């Protein structure tokens, strides 16, 4: 069967419309995507579990239903259970785990019409903002393969940016949709806490900090997929207000005159790259020209203290993940089952008191109240998505001496001693300094999006982050639609996407 040569010129909705009009067959789209994956992936390493035979079989049986009928799609290999397909979560100990069921969100992706061609690379348990797991090796940024696409949804972002698929799934527990979207020149929305389903395996993800959605090239693809997935599932921990109209309709609506606060200073009081500061100012000026009221302002939140509260959750969740890993392995997990950093974080989780954990979560609640008051004055809060352009592959990995030291600590079980030294907290702040802006929306549960409006002097993407009040994805989609029209990015692609 001949390939659909114009494949990369369409977004997901565009391809779905062609299928429904019978101008192209799902099989043709499937083959076009497979051809691009086979050509591009060896250099990028975005797809780590091909599902080509399953996708070909599904394409033959597909009927033209759903907004994304027959559209090639990739799943981030973290929490996204697909019956009969490995689910590694980037973890060495899970290399042979194969679920016999679909997670609820995967079911909804399928109902939307997508054809899943494979799974994408992610760091172990989605823990860091770069995608370089020992299990599958590093994923590279299509804009410059010496650099990272970010994480933890780095594989999905690299696949979309390089034109393998028009959209792919992602999850965001501290910026893991928005950071790779920024690094790869894509649109990435983190929905409101509770907006998309987490069943059947989870209630809240990362104490409510994490939520799943998609990474896309067009705004409307993100909106349409959220329409398809956003109803509560059985046993949802809470029911939030549903949208008054489809999000896809919001993309076409005028946002009106918005009150927008902007800030380019790191909440950790760490440096921000000059290109990023410049890009933020240029974005603020563009918003003024579009008719919005724009002021420089910042919510009264202790960013460093809040970042440290994140670590308490982080440590505890990793400890629980390692403990639950034993249930899959049929024995107690050991250091060889996970990466050195992961094992160390788990030890720190066991050394973290319930008092510290509760105190941290209470800080999140207070931050939510501060942001609610802030949004009485402003409709939108604008910051850079990241503080630095995409870093080089390997730059944030543990140095050999650090890794050796942590291995020794792990073997001796000295988690409490390590916690008292403050070394891990210091390393964490150094890492968060590159991406300090995204975590706030995870603490508060607010929707936030990264929009690919700027590029650095080196030609690397630089996303701008916009936060809205709880439950107000509609305003974000209206603003995103306006920005997409004012400064289009759809046809701006890396050389690898032109293969």
Image: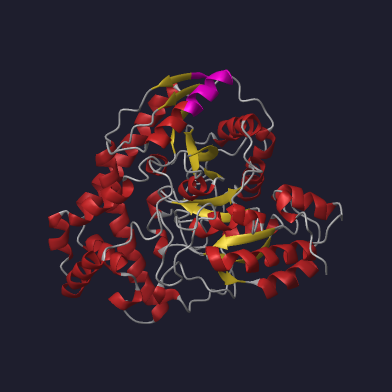
* 419 sits left or right of 308 in the view: left
The magenta segment is 282-293
Q: Dividing the image into 4 quarters, which one contains the N terminus? A: bottom right
Q: Is residue 288 magenta?
A: yes
* 218 sits left or right of 148 in the view: right
Mostly what secondary structure, the magenta segment? helix
Q: What residue is drawn where x is 45% and y is 65%?
A: 138
Q: What residue is drawn where x is 49% and y is 32%?
A: 468
Identify whether 69 is placed above or below 97.
above
Q: Quadrant of residue 101?
A: bottom right
Q: Quadrant of residue 117?
A: bottom right
* 265 sits left or right of 240 in the view: left
Percent x, y of residue 410: 21, 71
Percent x, y of residue 47: 56, 66
Identify whether 255 is placed above or below 62.
above
| Residue that extends furthest to the right in the rendered view of this protein | 22
């Amino acid at each position: 069967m001949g390939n659909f040569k114009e494949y990369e010129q369409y977004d997901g909705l565009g391809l779905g419309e062609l299928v429904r009009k019978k101008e192209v067959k799902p099989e043709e789209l499937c083959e076009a995507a497979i051809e691009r994956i086979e050509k591009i992936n060896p250099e990028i390493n975005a797809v780590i579990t091909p599902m080509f035979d399953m996708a070909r079989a599904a394409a033959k049986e597909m009927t033209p239903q759903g907004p994304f009928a027959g559209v090639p799609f990739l799943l981030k290999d973290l929490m996204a259970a697909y019956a009969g397909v490995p689910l590694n979560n980037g973890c060495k100990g899970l290399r042979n785990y194969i679920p016999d069921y679909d997670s609820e969100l995967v079911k909804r992706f399928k109902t939307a019409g997508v054809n899943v061609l494979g799974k994408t690379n992610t760091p172990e348990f989605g823990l860091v903002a770069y995608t370089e797991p020992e299990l599958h090796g590093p994923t590279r940024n299509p804009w410059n393969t010496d650099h990272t696409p970010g994480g933890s949804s780095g594989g999905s972002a690299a696949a979309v940016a390089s034109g393998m698929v028009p959209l792919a799934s992602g999850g965001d527990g501290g910026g893991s949709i928005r950071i790779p979207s920024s690094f790869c020149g894509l649109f990435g929305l983190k929905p409101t806490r509770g907006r998309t389903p987490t069943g059947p395996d989870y209630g809240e993800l990362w104490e409510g900090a994490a939520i799943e959605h998609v990474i896309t090239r067009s705004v409307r693809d993100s909106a349409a997929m959220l329409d398809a997935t956003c109803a509560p599932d059985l046993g949802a921990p809470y029911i939030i207000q549903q949208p008054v109209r489809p999000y896809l309709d919001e993309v076409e609506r005028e946002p009106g005159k918005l009150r927008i606060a902007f800030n380019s200073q790191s909440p950790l009081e760490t440096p921000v790259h000059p290109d990023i500061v410049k890009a933020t100012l240029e974005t603020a000026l563009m918003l003024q020209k579009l008719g919005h009221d724009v002021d420089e302002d910042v919510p009264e939140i202790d960013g460093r203290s809040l970042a440290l509260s994140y670590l308490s959750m982080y440590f505890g969740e990793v400890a629980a993940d390692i403990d639950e890993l034993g249930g899959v392995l049929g024995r107690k997990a050991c250091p060889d089952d996970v990466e050195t950093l992961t094992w160390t974080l788990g030890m720190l989780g066991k050394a973290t008191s319930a008092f510290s954990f509760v105190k941290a979560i209470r800080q999140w609640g207070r931050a939510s109240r501060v942001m609610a008051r802030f949004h009485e004055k402003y409709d939108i809060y604008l910051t850079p998505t990241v503080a630095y352009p995409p870093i080089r592959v390997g730059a944030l990995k543990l140095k050999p001496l650090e890794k050796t030291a942590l291995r020794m600590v792990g073997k001796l079980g000295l988690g409490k001693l390590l916690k008292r030294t403050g070394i891990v907290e210091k390393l964490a702040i150094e890492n968060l300094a590159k991406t300090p802006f995204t975590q706030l929306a995870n603490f508060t549960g607010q929707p936030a999006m990264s929009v690919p409006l700027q590029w650095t002097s080196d030609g690397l993407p630089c996303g701008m982050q916009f936060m809205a009040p709880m439950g107000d994805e509609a305003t974000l989609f209206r603003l995103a639609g306006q920005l997409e029209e004012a400064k289009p990015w759809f046809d701006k692609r890396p050389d690898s996407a032109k293969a």
